[in-house]
Image (cartoon, grey):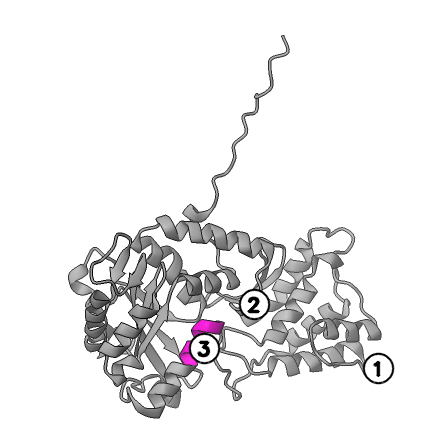
Amino acid sequence: MLALSRLQSVPTNYNRSGVLGRCRLSVLYRLLRLSLIQPSLGTQMRWKNRNIRELAHIVCGDADHFRYRSSCYITEFFQDCDLDYAHDGSTRWAWVASRLEEVLALPHPSPSVPPDAFVRIIRAILDKGEAQEGDSDRNKALAALNAVLAREGWEAFYDEHGLGQLRHNATNTIAQIANPHRPLTPAEVERQAQLNTYLDKCSEDELIEEVLLPLFRQLGFHRITAAGHKDKALEYGKDVWMKYTLPTLHVLYFGIQAKKGKLDSAGIGKPGSANVAEIHNQVNMMLGHEIFDSELNRRVLVDHAFIVAGGEITKQARNWLGNKLDATKRSQIMFMDRHDILNLFIVTNLPLPKNALPPKQIFAPFDDDIPF
């Protein structure tokens, strides 16, 4: 425990330039683009033997409300989960338990996000097409599975599309196989259009509180603190600051400067857009001002700054800001525009803000003509 506490308290803003700084930026850039971070090969999920056995019985169909699987169907089950396992004819539950242990030992982003293969197994178990007699909606199967998962700190549930999902109870993180560059389903395209319309009309505070905070929390950032716009004197160039813990237990600090509309390099600000010169001043202030981390009881500097725009960030604005900043600060800046926000928000399956949902249609109960 002493070694762990020392690792957690290691300062991470001592080397802002050079190879280490560029490596950090590269790793975290991939995190925001792919909603994943490079896995640590030394970490693995360890479950109690009792829970592994019970989950194996569920996969085999020995438990009530689950489809029974003989040897060939067990092999088929794992192949459907993109796992190259073939049952060798030994005791079914014991063989499946061994394969589940192998899956849990695969690399994964963090303790709150299991390996992708395990997520696929849970989704296959909860496939609504395998409903058994007396459990057409699979509520009984879901309850039986959650009785096992809860002992390890997880909860399974069905999302709005009827797809099985897995949530980490302690962090409320939903395990996702997220890739913002994959083709979207028709339902996701519809949700993306609704969110796009919402971003056109929302305020800057709503962009931060209803969209950015849930998004970054889902991506694994924590201690997310929004300064808001009521205390402008206390912002010091950042609307939000937050922390991210690497698999090595080192901590990086991030600041966010958010603008509702378009970010351009025009000499005169146009309605609905912000001038990049204003962002330049705020970024310099953000990177130079310390924040107080109450968990460590000390003041720290921001390692990286996100410039987030609810509209477009033009190439001219990016280039102008890059030329104005020196090489050290330039490596600390990352951009997110509306396109990035829309893709990440949709593929991580976050619920849309309340005001982004279409109004419910209310039908009058007596809309027919009176028959007399």
Q: Look at discs 2 and 1 and give the one toward the viewer.
A: 2
Vertical comparison of 21 with 123: above or below:
below
Furthest residue to the top? Answer: 372
Look at label 1 and name its amino acid.
Answer: Gly
Query: Which of marks 3 and 2 precedes in the sequence?
Result: 3
Residue wearing tag 1: 89
Q: Main secondary structure of the magenta part?
A: helix
**Residue 210 spot, x, y in % from top left:** 38, 55
Vertical comparison of 209 with 331: above or below:
above
**Residue 293 spot, x, y in % from top left:** 26, 74
Horizontally, residue 3 falls left or right of residue 42, namely left
- Residue 182 got which mark? 2
Query: Is 353 within the magenta?
Result: no
Horizontally, residue 119 falls left or right of residue 283, namely right
- Distance CA(mark 3)–CA(mark 1): 42 Å
Residue 277 visible (yes or no): yes
Horizontally, residue 270 falls left or right of residue 309, namely left
Residue wearing tag 3: 30
Badge 1 local density, few (<14 within 10 Å), some, or many (20+)?
few
Which residue is painted at 25% across and 55% down in the image? 270
**Residue 306 spot, x, y in % from top left:** 32, 71
